[in-house]
Image: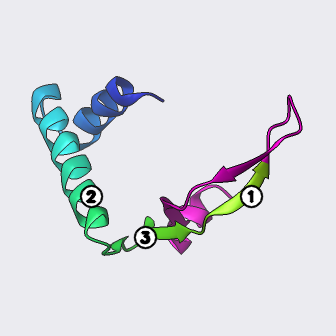
Amino acid sequence: MNKSELIDAMAAVAGLTKVDSKKALDAFIQVAGETLKVGDKLTLVGFGTLSVSEKAARQGRNPQSGLKINIPAKKVIKFKAGADLNAKIQ
């Protein structure tokens, strides 16, 4: 499912227009990004938790040449699915 299909599905389930559903989804994405940027967790009960984790700098290897490379430290987003979401796929 892509973003436009998600907007269509949200509009159908919630009884909203597609424009309103797009505004709601865009607002959610913006707020989630801002929340994670400051280092806070975003927890949606029944859906899951988004959080930011830091990966340390490390040595890697270029698979083509075999040369060692330095991989810089970076922040990554982690998602842990909630119990209700896990139950829906079982």
In the rendered image, which quarter is residue 20 located in?
top left
Magenta residues, as a range? 61-90
* Residue type marked 3: Gly
- Whether residue 6 appears in magenta in the rendering, the answer is no
The C terminus - image quarter: bottom right
**SS at circle 3:** loop
The answer to which of marks 1 and 3 sits earlier in the sequence is 3
Q: Position of residue 89 (x, y in %)?
A: 63, 55
Mark 2 lies on residue: 32
Q: What crowding class fits label 3: few (fewer than 14 Cα within 10 Å), some (14-19), or many (20 or more)?
A: few
The answer to which of marks 3 and 2 sits earlier in the sequence is 2
Q: Viewer-proximal residue, 64 or 87?
A: 64
- Any part of residue 81 in sight: no
In the displayed structure, does residue 27 sit left or right of residue 69? Answer: left
Which residue lies at the image location 67% right of the left edge and 52% below the top edge? 70
* Residue type marked 1: Gln
Q: Viewer-proximal residue, 16 or 75?
A: 75
**SS at circle 2:** helix
Mark 1 lies on residue: 59
In the rendered image, which quarter is residue 19 located in?
top left
In front of the other: label 3 or label 2?
A: 2
Distance between the Cα atoms at labels 2 and 1?
A: 31 Å
- Whether residue 71 appears in magenta in the rendering, the answer is yes
- Any part of residue 52 in sight: yes
Mark 3 lies on residue: 46
The answer to which of marks 2 and 1 sits earlier in the sequence is 2
